[in-house]
Amino acid sequence: SVQLEGAVCVCAYEQVRDQMERERLKLQAARPYSMEVLSQVRDYRVMVGLQYLIRLGRAAGIRSRLAPVLSFPLGSNVVTLAELTRMYETLVSGVSYREGHRGKAAMGREENTSREFENGLSIIDRIETPDGEILYARNPAVRQVVDPDTAPAVSHILQNVVSYGTGRYAGKHVRLHSEDPKKEAELEALDLPVPLLGKTGTANQFRNAAFVGYVPVPANDKDAVMALPGGYTIGAYVGYDKNRPMKSGNTHITGSVGALPIWSDLADAVLEKERAGERFDPVDLSFGGLGLQYPDTNQLFVPVDPKQGGAVLQGRGGRHARIAPDFPVILTYGIVGAGGRFDPARFFKPFWQNEQAVSGKQ
């Protein structure tokens, strides 16, 4: 048979040519702006992805302007610390809050449509008259944004940041404490790290730095475990008012150096407020340590190599559990096959489907 360049036969070339002609005619007959055409245009697919990120940000509580630019993932859009903290709350809990309220003050008042009310942000819980009549009561509406499978997976990524990444300072310094001197001495001797979640951030030229994270709370008064429900989202930010670089000579301030120590002090204060150290028995802690309990979504903890960017260690399998083991793993979903090989499952779905699922149950 005749071959082109000694590699491709003429019949194969003719098949490719004929197929390309069929595709060209099919494309030519289609409407220029139909999804059949646009879905094959790379720039269009990128723009759709950027617009999805913007809508997801809005659903998670961000109100600042977000531009659909390619540098979006690098932090080119400016948001407030409050917005960033609310977004992390949504990533961990899966829900965002919108203000709903009841009482006379909620009827026909224009100020109740302000951003603070819209976003569920409020420092006032309730307003009552001397005779007990409720004029205003905070009643935030819950909106499911992140599905129940994705939220634990993202949360565990943030936990790994504290355990193995740039958030290690918090893992080394945030501890349980007690007002009882004897118990405080026992907790100090155990020196157990508290399971925490978070991520550092540093702007170009070290102009500002931040750490945003989540502090779990005791799951109950019986078991020595922490849980995500009822926890606290905290954001810490450092920077000059005039936005000048935070560096001098060879010294520069990053998120882990500038913001994380402040965040860790706040985390200590939150644990003290929750009396976490008082609620655990040091004997139980000495045997089992202090773990973070995730909701049971049929997840697997799969061993990974932290020196290879968290790549899955094939042949090591994975196990179903609610508390992560004390070696590098990632919480994910899939099937463990023959020889311990892990085959991941796709579990992503658009955030608006989560809202529909919740509204359908109500």
Image (cartoon, grey):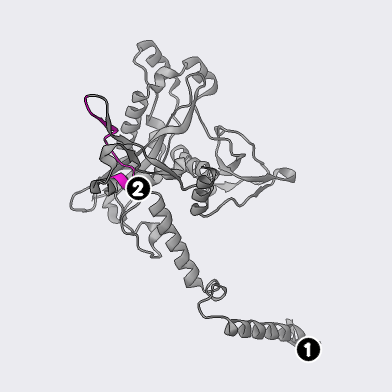
Look at the numbered disc 1 and give the secondary structure of its residue: loop
Q: Nearer the viewer, residue 148 or 161?
A: 148
Mark 1: amino acid? Val
Which residue, given by chain and number where applicable, does mark 1 sit on? Answer: 2
N-terminal of the pair, mark 1 or mark 2, is: 1
Residue 302 sits above or below residue 10 on the image: above
Mark 2: amino acid? Leu
Q: Which residues are magenta?
A: 117-130
Q: Which mark is residue 84?
A: 2
Residue 67 in magenta stretch: no
Q: Main secondary structure of the magenta part?
A: loop
Q: Nearer the viewer, residue 191 or 132?
A: 132
Residue 94 position within the rendered picture, expressed as x and y whole percent measured from the top left:
47, 43
The quarter in which the N terminus is drawn is: bottom right
Residue 127 in magenta stretch: yes
Tag 1 and tag 2, C-beta contact below 8 Å: no
Residue 318 position within the rendered picture, expressed as x and y whole percent measured from the top left:
64, 40
Is residue 163 toward the left or the right of residue 336 in the image?
Answer: left
Quadrant position of residue 89: top left
